[in-house]
Amino acid sequence: MKITVRAFADYREFIGKEMELIVPEEKTIGELLAELGDRYPKLRSEMFTPTGELKDFINIFINGRNIAFLKDMATPLTDGDIIALFPPVAGG
Amino acid sequence: MYGWIGRYLRIDLGSGTVRKEVITPDLARKYLGGRGLGTHFMMTEVDPKVDPLSPQNKLIFAAGPLCGTNAPSASHYDVISKGPLNGTIAASSSGGLFGPMLKYAGYDMIILEGKSAKPVYLWICDDVVEIRDAAEIWGKTVPETTEAIRSATDEEASVACIGPAGERLVLFANVMNECGRAAGRSGVGAVMGSKNLKAIAVRGTGAVRVPDPKAFREAVVKASAKIKANSVGGKGLKNYGTDVLVNILNELGGLPTRNFLDGYFPTADKVGGESLAKQLLIRPRGCYACIISCGRATKVTNPKFAGQGEGPEYETAWAFGPDCGIDDLDAVTKANYICNDYGMDTITMGSSVACAMNLFENGVITTKDTDGIALNFGDAEAMVELVRKTAEGEGFGKKLALGSYRMAESYGHPEYSMTCKKQEMPAYDPRAIQGIGLNFATGNRGGCHVRGYTISPEVLGQPVKLDPRVTEGKPALDITFQDLTAALDSSGMCLFTTFGLGAEDLAELLSAATGLNITTEEFMKIGARIWNLERLFNLKAGLSALDDKLPERLTKEPILTGPSKGLVNRIDEMLPEYYKLRGWDSAGIPTKNTLADLGL
Ligand code: SF4
């Protein structure tokens, strides 16, 4: 399946603006992020604590839905999904 | 008194009399300062039915007890009046240096009454208060005015002024200070213009006293650390400004597009904070005592839209960008510069252009109405030209100067105006984010995001992540945010500190600055008191529950594309509960018990 990953704010410095990934087998968002973390250690250290917990105020969307309202890291991915990664941002 | 100065100026612009009056400790504790105290004086001294642009309306500049202290981002003051854009109680907040300077000069507040026979400006230097002739600066832009007044008074003075738009009574004219900071919304600049008051320049050499400087410093260090540990104090706002929000709202499908016809704009990234940082940013700018520095000093070199100044903020980038179907950051920034120079609110300006484009595309207006300009969504040059025409008071710009509601109504189609209580909504689509819809509808000055920023939990996940599509629990959430913000605005802090600080932290800072024991409960109750007082003003002005609504487009026409496709706002599921939790009857009127409990 084809998955698009978009990065915003500081995360663009680590992985670029957008990438398309061809994922051969079924995967959860947690598994995909773990693989991305292997490729981009800086992204991993910014997003996760040393024990692998997602840090505070980081938002991960799949097709516009925050994974907090799906199945969190266990949310399965499907073909064509768009993942958006946001570091903590504020404003108004 | 500590924190407060305990003294304010009452100036009758008609007779030229200046009086120094005292704020009693009881009153100060009841309403704090800024928005709360100003609303109290409006309620007790002005008939809510007054014509906002008549001499009988008053204009109040008020700082809060924390303003001018060393508390983080303690820079904010409010301009309070009856707003001409929609006739509600208006309180517009601004940062910069004006609020602290007012306190250092020895005043918590200035109440301006009547109308001067000719253009004047005020010069306040500690105990000296002069009403000076402004004939030579009338007609000048904000930067020109600021410079002229500083060279005539003191280069260190803070200048809050109106531009030509305020003089011309553009209904959404603002008050600008330090050139780039705005008390932006509801048209408080037009009230200033109606009084023939061009500017207030202030220079103070005093200080704000706190009872125990060491204890206060400790409270400040603690609060600053909390802000720094939060997203607001991190790299995001400093590197990208508030415009960093464009992408997260768009990815959610909650970025209003083409006058709210849609909630998703495929090329939004081009006007987002990341693009801004790369293309136009010179450096971040901060207000007094700010550890965040969300302001943007920018420069556009593209000859078509060349200029230099401050901005754009997120709301501005959206209003001139996606809301008009535009993704040209240079054009968006140019429109922002014109608004800053002439003194106009960017949200209402942009949304009025978007409304005109919508009317044009649907054939309600034609080039005959628009001075020959075709107004299609996406046309950046037409957008900038309309902003210029409004600023200069030319042709179709005079229609736009009324705001989108009156303009659309004059063509028989007010439903094209994306307003609540006739004030334009900001950059969050209530169809994708339920709680903010309720907040816009119940806002005491109409469509507004800084009366209860539920975007924080509903989109940004702070302090907790709440599902934006759910209505359950949102009335209580809105009330908490509304009350917290009312108390915060009245204390003199910047709203952005609430990303890191809760009510308990703010109450602690306030207690340390004033020497009073203000508990979290009291702090929140002060907020509720102010909210209800504003409600009472509006009810007396003639508004009712019928005004607590969203434009029909948002409840009947679903978002067309993007992640929130198919969604509408479900305000009917929230509003009755909101009234109940507020302690209001089903007609939206505070009950006797509620008022008694709040000491109103
Ligand atoms: S966060 Fe922004 S608006 Fe608030 S005080 Fe700092 S620079 Fe001013």
Image (tube, rainbow, N blue to C red):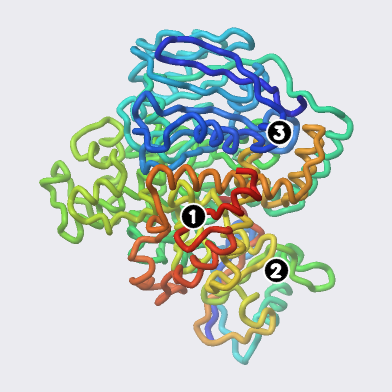
Q: In the structure shown, which secondary structural element does the residue marked by tag 1 occupy?
A: loop
Q: Nearer the viewer, residue B106 or A59?
A: B106
Mark 2 residue type: Tyr
Specify the label residue A40 is tagged with. Answer: 2
Specify the label residue B66 is tagged with. Answer: 3
Q: Is residue B101 visible?
A: no
Q: In the structure shown, which secondary structural element does the residue marked by tag 2 occupy?
A: loop
Residue at 47%, 50% (x, y): give it.
Answer: B448
Residue at 60%, 73% (x, y): give it.
Answer: A66
Q: Residue furthest right?
A: B214
Give the crowd class for mark 3: few <14, some 14-19, many >=20 residues within 10 Å: many
Instruction: State the separation of the CA atoms marked 3 and 2.
Output: 44 Å
Mark 1 residue type: Ile
Image x and y of residue B221, in percent: 82, 40
Specify the label residue B554 is tagged with. Answer: none
Image x and y of residue B167, in percent: 34, 25
